[in-house]
Structures are given as C-alpha cells and as structure tokens.
Amino acid sequence: MKEQVIAQKVGNRTGIGKGKSAVGQRPAKRDREPGESIAARLRSLVTYVPLALRIGVVAIVALVALVGYRAAASADFFRVRKVETRGAVRASSDDIKTTVLRDLGETGVWRADLEQLSKHLERLPWVRTAVVTRVLPDGIRVRVTERQPQAVVRTGSGRFIWVDDDAVYLGEMSPTDQMPSFFLRGWNEEESTAARAENRDRVKKFLELQRAWLAQSLSERVSEVNLLDLRDVRVQLAGDDSQIEVRLGGQDQAERLKNALNVLDTQRQTSRGPLISYIDLSQGKRAIVGLVTGGQTVADGTGSESARR
C-alpha cells in the first residue's frame, strides 16, 4: 500500500491569513458603569409611568412626611423639662417658668409658638421684653430685659407702688428699697387705656420736675407732688414744713417752687411763720400766703396776702 503523505500546511508566522484579518477587528465595547446603567434605566422607566401616578406617589410621600413630623413634634421627647432664665433680678423666675409650662404644656418645644409666649411673659411684673429661644430637645431659654423703676406712687388707699416710665405697675415698695426723692400722688387707678395714657403723662411730668429740682437742690424740701391735674400742680413740703402746700399751676413749676420757698423762708422769720398753711404761685405773678387764723384775708406790704382757712 502506498502511504499517504499529508503535507503539513505551513502558515504565515505573522498570523496573517488565519481566519479574519487582524486589521479589520473592532475593539470590544467597555461595560457601562453600574451607576450610569441604573440611572439610565430609571429614567427610561419614569418615562413610561403616567403623570397621574407620579403625582399620587409624591402626595403619598408628602403625607407620610407630615404625619411623621406631627408624631415626632408631639412626642414626649420634646416635652418641656428645663426652663433657663437670664437677666431676671426683680422679675420672678418662678412666674416665668410657670408661664412657659402653661403655654407649652401641650405643644412641646418643637411646635412652640415663641412669639406668643414672649407676649405672655411681657405681661409679668418687671418684664419689659422677653426673648425666647428653643434649646432642643426639651429646653426653653428666656432672656429678660427688666423694667426700671422711675417713681413711687402713693395710691388713694395709702399703698406705695413702683412704676416705670411707661406707667406700668411693677410692685409694692419694700422696706429695703432706697427711698425716692419724693412721691407721686394723683394716680388714676382705673384699668383702662385712657387711664394708662393719663398716668404716662403724669410720670413724664414727674421725671421732668425731679430732674429740675435735683439740679437746684430743692428736691429734699419736697415730700410729694400731686399731679392729679397737670394744669394745677401742687407740692406738699417735707420736714418741718410738712403741713404746707405749694400751688404751682400748669407751667414753670421749677422756678415757681424756688420762688415759693424764698417767700416761705422770709415769712418764717416773722410771727406769721407758724401759721402758714399754703403758698399759691399758680398765677405766676405774686405769692399768696394762706394762714390758719381766725381773721379775714388782708394784704400785707410785701405783695402777699393772708387767707382764712
């Protein structure tokens, strides 16, 4: 038998000619990033979701968030447990704490109406302003600016009370308080807007007189000033002259008081001195001296008059 000789094919050592040409091959595509692939798929999916369904989903999510917020805000976690007070010296810290707990007992710290709470705190004695802040989760901080006492009013019943320049009642005068130069009388004790406005004018006039008389060293001779009628200001003197009233009228009270005291000091050197009950300078021209006597009114050579009382 003849042996079949199979000739071995000698290929191109460079590899050219095997299958497809290497020059014509395309590089394999890179796999997409996982994030890009998911985002792309989601965008494709959303385009097929109807608009109404998308709105419904948003509404459900918002509702769940609202319910969760209310549940969290009303939870015991935000109940008021600590009330921190700053700036309160005369104002009662206990009253401040009681007001905070009363206002926020149901709402808690998270849902507290701080503006409304501030208004309630400013109704307390001595509190001019109250700045309220949250200290989450369970605290409230109150920063107080106190009212400053400006005058002591003697009421019709004989009580002595402090008031500020806005005619706000602050509290009764205590034995440890520093004595004022003199007291204010003629206070309207009605609880009304009109009475508050009148009293504000009285405090303004009182402070004006106080500054003027302090500057002239006259205030120590005054016990109290009656401002019931601002057109008829009257002063009760102090010390050995406490039984004498000086009538100053509606203007120039500082200068008129000075003149009245000069007349008084002059008359004190005479026999009529112990009988003087009042000096009237309300007309601003001359002093009328009132005497407690059994005689009739007579004019003297100094231009003053004595009057029966």
Image (tube, grey):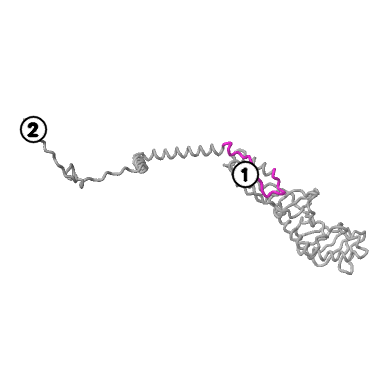
Q: Which residues are magenta?
A: 75-94
Q: Tell me which corner region of the image, top left, top right, bottom left or bottom right, holds residue 110.
A: top right
**Frontmost residue, 41 versus 122:** 41
In the image, 189 versus 303, the foreground residue is 189
**Residue type, label 1:** Ile
Name above or below for residue 296 compared with residue 147: below
Q: Residue at x 67, y 42 (%)?
A: 97
Amino acid type of the residue that numbered disc 2 sits on in the rendered structure: Glu
| Residue hosting label 1 | 140
Name the quadrant of the C terminus.
Answer: bottom right
Q: Secondary structure at mark 1?
A: strand
Q: Give whichever of discs 2 and 1 has the lower sequence position.
A: 2
Per the image, the residue denoted by label 2 is 3
Q: Nearer the viewer, residue 1 or 116?
A: 1
What's the distance in space between the residues labelled 2 and 1, CA to CA? 110 Å
- Mark 2 or mark 1, whichever is nearer to me: 2
